[in-house]
Structure formats: C-alpha cells, structure tokens
Image: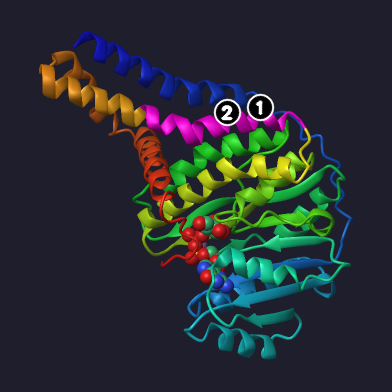
C-alpha cells in the first residue's frame, strides 16, 4: 500500500543519505593539515604486545617482521603472551634463542581466557620507563617504518593513540574487504584530522604509555582495540588513523564469522565506552563528540533502517501485491551488482546480526 511504500522509501533515503552526506563532508578534510607536531628525532622505550593463540604457522614471520623495523633495537621490547595448545610458545622460544638481537619476553598463560585478558596480563609486564605501547596481532605485517612513524606522531603532547590502515592480502577478496577498507580509510583519516576516529585497528595500535600508567585502559567485554582509542579520545587526547602506516593482513579462516565478531565488538565500543569514561570522571567535551554521535548512529541505529525498510517492502508485496514495492525491491537487487553498494549492504547485515548476537554471546574467544 501507499503508506508502506512511502515509509519504506523515507527510511531508505535516511539510511543511505546520512553516510553519504557525512562522507562528502569529510572529503573536504582530505587535504587539510594534521595540526600535529611531528618529531622524527624522538625515540623512546617501546613495548610491543603480541597475544597468540595457535599461531605456529605464522609466528616466525611475524617476529621477523618486527625485527625488520627500523626502530633502535635497544629501545624495543616484545612481549608475547601465549595461550596456545599447538606449540606456538615453543616456536617462539626457539626463534628467540637464535635471533637474540630482539629483546623478547614470553609469557605463558595457564589457560586460554581470550585476547583481552591476555593483553591485560601483558600490560602488567610493561616497565614504568616505557614511553609507547603497541598492540598487534600475529597475522599483522607492518611496513618497516611503522614504529618510528607512530612514535614521531606520539611525540606531540596532544596525540594519545595511533593506528594504521589495513590492506588485506592472500586469498581472493570475495567478501570485498578491501572495498570496505577503501571507503572507511577515507572516513577514518578525515575524522582523525578533525580530532579522532572511534574505530582503531588491533593489528597496529600504538598508545602513549603515560596515559596507560595514569588511567589504565578500559577492560570490558569486546574492548580489545577500538574501545582503547575511543576512551583515549574521550579523555581529551587525539586517537588517530594515519595513511602512511600500513598493515598487511592475510585473509584467513571464516570471513563471515570474523566480520560478525568485529561488528559485535564495534557495537560494544559504541554502547559502553562513553559511559565508561564518564563514570571514571575522565570525560572531556571536544569535537570528538560530534564524530562519536554520527558514528554511533551509523553503527547502532542506521543498519536497522535498512532492515526495517526492506521488511516493509516485503510486507507490501506479500499483502498487497504492490507493483511499486516490487519495483523498489528490484532496484535494490539490481544495485547489488555494484561492488560498493554490495559492500555497504553486507556491512549493514553484519552489524544487525552482531547486535542480535551480542544479546547472548559477546564472542570474546573465537575460532578461526
Ligand atoms: N593469548 C591469546 N589468547 N591470544 C589470542 C586469543 C586468546 O584467547 N585469541 C586470539 N588471540 C590472538 C591471535 O593469536 C592473534 O594474534 C590476535 O589475537 C588476533 O586474533 P585473530 O585470530 O587474528 O583474529 P582477527 O584477525 O579476526 O582479529 C581482529 O578482530 C579482533 C576483534 O574481534 C583484529 O582486528 C583484532 O585485533 C581484534 O581484537
Ligand atoms: Mn587477524
């Protein structure tokens, strides 16, 4: 019926127009300056925290990648925190005994309790004179200047966290991961120029250790990467993504499960971090607030508009055999031939499924 069609159309317009307008607005920031005092000479003690769960296949390559960083070895410490049952710890020990120019500490957990728990434990081993903490994953390969670049940005007293852009490699990118990234990197970098981006990437997340020493990091379910950065941004420091620190990550395991889990953890960030910062009495109002509000809408509410709008059209079709309803659905279906449209629609589905799944399982321990 008319009413359903008008409703569905309105909802769809809001759903697609909001991110497009936001994107167009942010595009203007692409060429703006960073307003950051970069100090290329600045070097400090740095701890890389690497949690591992069954990574025998990739761990050596990862350690070699860290070894190839142009950062001074005497300032670098790698803390591997392992809960594997496939002998990863043994591979690490063996590697480190023959490559002893890298200062490596291996912590073995008694049992597997999830990535976040592992990070929390590793943080207890960071020495007080350490200036920067870098979280990473076993399957994250950085460009050789990643560490020095991040440290030169963190030299600015206003910058609290720095993350990298991700590029996916390996098996065919059927699920459009790189298309998704191309779009989001523009958004993340532009938000970072305005103030901060609420979405950070676990494969490379560098934070000023001083902040951690002063106020700790949020440790709630799902807070394994973005929540650290959002928390830091809410306390008044900048949490940025830059485009010249690049992580290459091979696509492995089930992509769909991974995307749903990532959506779940993003949602948990948007639902909890602001309240958490306020409760701790650390919240400072800044231009990050506006970014947060839009991203909150885009993650928490906007996906449901697409779901509801589509449902209306189906009802319209089923109950009233509406031609307009059918035509609108057909247009939507045809647009799926466009890569970026497909990418967008899938992402909305992951967010919707993630929201539902969060109700009974926050997915803090995952299979690959
Ligand atoms: N010690 C420990 N214990 N390490 C773990 C555990 C655990 O229970 N679970 C996973 N890890 C380690 C993995 O070995 C890997 O080094 C890292 O955590 C990330 O896990 P992946 O298996 O590579 O998962 P991903 O690529 O899908 O992870 C992405 O999403 C996560 C949030 O859901 C990344 O962006 C992560 O950084 C992010 O935390
Ligand atoms: Mn990974």
x, y percentage for residue 163? 66, 50
Quarter occupied by the N terminus: top left
Residue 251: give x, y in percent of width and height.
43, 60
Q: Main secondary structure of the magenta part?
A: helix
In front of the other: 193 or 355? 355
Quadrant housing residue 348: top left
Please say whether residue 330 is visible from this viewpoint: no
**In this figure, which residue is indicated by the disc labeled 1?**
290
**Which residue is found at the position 55% from the left and 54% from the top?**
222
Question: Distance from label 1 to label 2 (Cα)?
Answer: 6 Å
Q: Which residue is mark 2?
A: 294
Q: Is residue 360 above or below residue 239?
A: below
Cβ–Cβ under 8 Å for marks 1 and 2: yes
Residue 74 image offset from top left, x and y in percent: 84, 75
Q: Is residue 108 magenta?
A: no
Tell me the colour scheme of the image: rainbow
Label 1's element?
helix
Q: Which residues are magenta?
A: 285-305
Residue 217 appears in the rendering: yes
């Amino acid at each position: 019926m008319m009413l359903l069609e008008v409703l569905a159309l309105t909802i769809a317009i809001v759903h697609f127009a909001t991110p497009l307008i936001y994107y167009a607005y942010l595009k203007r920031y692409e060429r703006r300056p960073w307003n950051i005092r970069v100090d290329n000479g600045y070097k400090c003690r740095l701890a890389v925290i690497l949690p591992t769960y069954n990574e025998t296949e990739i761990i050596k390559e990862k350690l070699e990648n860290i070894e190839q960083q142009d950062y001074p070895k005497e300032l670098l410490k790698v803390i591997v925190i392992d809960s594997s049952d496939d002998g990863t710890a043994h591979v690490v020990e063996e590697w480190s005994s023959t490559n002893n120019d890298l200062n490596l500490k291996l912590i073995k957990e008694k049992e597997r309790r999830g990535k976040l728990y592992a990070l929390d434990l590793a943080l207890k081993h960071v020495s007080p004179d350490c200036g920067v903490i870098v979280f990473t994953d076993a399957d994250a390969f950085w460009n050789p200047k990643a560490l020095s670049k991040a440290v030169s940005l963190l030299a600015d007293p206003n910058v609290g966290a720095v993350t990298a852009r991700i590029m996916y490699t390996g098996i065919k990118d059927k699920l459009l991961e790189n298309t998704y990234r191309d779009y989001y990197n523009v958004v993340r970098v532009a938000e970072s120029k305005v103030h901060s981006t609420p979405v950070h990437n676990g494969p490379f997340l560098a934070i000023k250790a001083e902040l951690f020493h002063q106020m700790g990091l949020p440790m709630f379910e799902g807070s394994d990467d973005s929540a650290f950065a959002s928390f830091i941004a809410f306390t008044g420091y900048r949490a940025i993504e830059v485009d010249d620190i690049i992580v290459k990550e091979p696509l492995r395991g089930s992509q769909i499960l991974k995307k749903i889990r990532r959506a779940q953890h993003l949602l948990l960030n948007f639902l909890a971090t602001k309240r958490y910062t306020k409760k701790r009495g650390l919240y400072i109002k800044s231009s990050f607030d506006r970014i947060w509000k839009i991203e909150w809408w885009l993650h928490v509410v906007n996906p449901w508009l697409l779901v509801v709008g589509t449902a209306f059209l189906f009802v319209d079709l089923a109950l009233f055999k509406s031609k307009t309803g059918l035509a609108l659905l057909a247009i939507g279906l045809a647009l799926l031939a466009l890569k970026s449209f497909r990418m967008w629609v899938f992402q909305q589905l992951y967010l919707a499924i993630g929201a539902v799944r969060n109700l009974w399982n926050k997915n803090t321990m995952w299979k690959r």
